[in-house]
Structures are given as C-alpha cells and as structure tokens.
Amino acid sequence: MSILSSLTVLIIDDVEIEREILSFALESAEMKVINADNGKTGLEIFQSKKPDLIIIDLYMPVMDGYEVLNRIKKLSPLTPVIVISGAEEIEDAIKAIKLGAWDYLTKPVNDVNILYHSLERVVERALLLKQKENYEKDLEKKIKQRTLELSHINDKLIIENKIRKQAEFELQQIRDNLEIEVQKKTSQLRKAKENAESANEQLKKSISLLEHEAALGTLTSGIAHDLNNVLTEMMAYSMIEKAALNIKNILSEEQENQLIKEFKKIEISCKAIKDSVDIGQKLCQSFTSISKSVAMGRKSQFILPLINPPLGIIQRKIKNLKINVEIIHDENIPKVNCNGSEIQRILLNLFINAIQAMERVSNERNLIIELSYDNKMVYIKVTDTGEGIPSELQSKIFDNFFTTKLSGSGIGLSTAKKIVEAHHGIITVKSKPGNGTTFTIALPI
C-alpha cells in the first residue's frame, strides 16, 4: 500500500477547475480530498477536520495563502503544507518556504508524478519529524523519571541520616553504596545521553537531506515554465556528442562507451520530457483561455494527434478501473481549422465524464473514440459503457451549471458546447440508462 493511501488532503484554491483537477489526481491515488475556495474557509476546515496534508494557493480573496500558511504553522507546525501557485517569481517560493511551506509547485501541475513525488517527500519528512519528537519526549520522560527516583533516594538518605545519627558507620556504608550506585547510574545516563545525541545527529542529517531534496523540488517547480525553452538545446544530441569527443582523449575505452550509452539515455529522456511539456503547455493555454476568443490559435490540423495527450493525463484512472480504450478512425481524414488546445480540453472533459460514468458499473468497461468524415464535416464520437443518462435530463446537460454530480461544477459540457459552436460545429448526445452514452462532435472541414 502506498504511503499516500488513505491520507486526508485539504485543497485551498479559489479556482474551481484547479481544485477539480487536483482532486481527481489525488482521489485516483486513493486519497480523501476536502476542498475550500478561500483562505478563511480553508483555515476553518483545517481546525475542524485536522487533515494530514494541505495544498494551498498563494493568491486568493478573503485571506491569501501567506496568511493561512503563517497561521497553520503556529497551530500545527508538523502538518505538511505544499504551496501551489501560478506565480512564477522565485521570490514567492522563497517567501513561502520561510513562512513554513514544505514544498512549492507551480500551476498547472500537468505531470501527476511530480505531484505524487512531492506528496511522498513531505509525508516522509513529517514522519521523521514526528519520530524525532516522540523520541525526544520519551527521553525527557525517562530522564525526569530517573531524576525523581534519585531525588527520592536522596530524600530517604537525608531522613535516615537524621534518624540514625548514632549509626554513623552504617550510614557511611549506605553513603558509599549510594555513591557507587549514583556513579553507575550517572555513567548509564551519560552513555544514554551520548547515544541520544548520536541518534539526534543522525535524525538531523536525515532531515537535512530531506530538506535539501525539498529545496531541489522547489527549484525544479519554480523553473518548470522555462523547461520548453531549453528542451530544443537538450535535444541537440550532436552538441553533447561533440562535447564527448572533446574529452575522449582523457577517457579509457570502457569509460567512453559508458558515456555514449548515458548520452543515448539522455536523448530518449529529453524526447519524453519535451512531449510532456508540449502537452502541458497546450492544456495550460486551454485552461487560461476561457475568457478569450476560441479563434485565437486556430490552424489547419488533423484531429487524430489531439486524442492521445488527454488520454495520457487520465491514464492512471483508466488503468485502475481496467477500462479498455479503442481508437477507430477512417483513412485520409481531412484537416480541420481549429484550436487544438480547445479541442483537447473538450476531449479531456468527455473522457473524464465517461470514466466517472463507468465507475459504478459491473459489466465490461469500454471507452471508444471514433473519427469519421463526409463532404462537409469531420465527426468525433466518444462512447462509454457506463450508467447512461436519463432521457429527461439529456436536454439539460449542456445548460450552464447543470450537473448530476455531488461535486460537479456544471460548466464542463456547457463550455464544451460553446467551444464547438465557436468553431461553427455541433455537439450532440445519445444515451440510454444502462447502455452507456455517446457524444458526437461535428466540425466543418
């Protein structure tokens, strides 16, 4: 079982879509999620629910993230707090860390593995700190207990000294024996103290290492938005190879071969990183373009390459639910003049809805994406084998703020319809309770 399983995480963020994305990622890893849309509400929930971990945005109305962070540190210094913000200034990260943040990530978090790694790191650090605190408390209790015992012995000796003034010889023997016992116990305490100090140094080294790793995580998160700018240079493997040739003369043949193998690994990793960054940039632009014209960023492009990136984001949930994914497409499907990021945003929404519709069914779970075309239109069909939608609700699902989910916002499908209509297209739904649902998007060629 993962160290993250069964954790209760409080998300404090005034942007609902960001809360939903984070909640979906955390719940996919079997964590319990509590949401708050501002700092004041989040602080109240923290005091009443006592979550294991907090993810907080820096800039919010009512009470900003800095104030909430400062108060939480005073109330519960051992509760891990991860700051997640769209701010790209390193000063924000430094200020948050000084106020007590355990890690700092920039929004949006497109790679859930980065989020999970950050969560695992701060939870491990919290466990170490808790162990250190318990150890120190136990040691202090033992020292007090032993001191009290020695105090009782000393008091007893004083009383006996007063009573037995005439028995100085016997009293001297008692004192001699007591001195030996005290020396023995003092030696034991000194050794215990040395052992405690040694263990404490080991804990400090472990905590220092974790803090160093956290700082590296913070720095990596803070420069994530610049990653795409350097990927091109990272992919310039010929430059790396040239650099390898410059040091070739000082390396043995075995070292040279090992270096070439490592550079090939770097090339493969750079390709994977660049693909992920491209996806993240497109989706980030999509999430921040709600108030902008969909016409911005349009170009003539194929629909098929736009399907896999949204599927990649929800791949963990697909795997957990054992969903069969099938992509069916005609040959020679023409290009469509569209905003690729917006189309991916629609597809991601439809895929998530399909997964949620199949969570409670016992039959085989299938997600089918079909591409076809005619003389005027390119058609995208997304079909699931989920619960289906009652006929009386099908005419309402594209309305603003209409939802049948307890935690839904009711803006996903309404936004999808607006985007499709802005492309001069049509989106329709066919569904029957118990037999799944099919959404069809028609875009003009």
Image (tube, grey):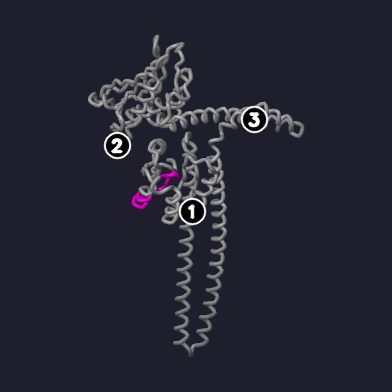
The type of residue carrying mark 3 is: Phe
Local secondary structure at mark 1: helix
Where residue 416 appears, x then y in whole percent?
Answer: 37, 26
Q: CA distance from mark 1 to mark 3?
A: 39 Å
| Spatial separation of the CA atoms under disc 2 and disc 3 | 50 Å
Specify start and end residues of the magenta stretch as a single range: 43-60
Task: Say which residue appears at 54% left-offset and 37% top-offset.
Answer: 224
Q: CA distance from mark 2 to mark 1?
A: 37 Å
Please state which of the two labelled residues, at mark 2 or mark 1, is closer to the viewer.
Answer: 2
Q: Which residue is mark 1?
A: 129
Q: Quadrant of residue 420?
A: top left
Contact check, label 1 and label 3, Cβ < 8 Å: no
Q: Secondary structure at mark 3?
A: helix
Nearest the eye: 3 or 341: 341
Mark 1: amino acid: Leu
Q: Secondary structure at mark 2?
A: loop
Query: Which residue in the rendered view is the most extreme toward the bottom?
Result: 166
Decide if residue 216 is on the left or right side of residue 407. right
Residue with the mark numbered 3: 263
Quadrant placement of the N terminus: top left
Identified by mark 2, the residue type is Leu
Sequence-wise, the earlier of marks 2 and 3 is 3
Name the residue beneath numbered marker 2: 406
Q: Give the crowd class for mark 3: few <14, some 14-19, many >=20 residues within 10 Å.
A: some
Of the two numbered discs 2 and 1 on the same chain, state the one appearing first in sequence. Answer: 1
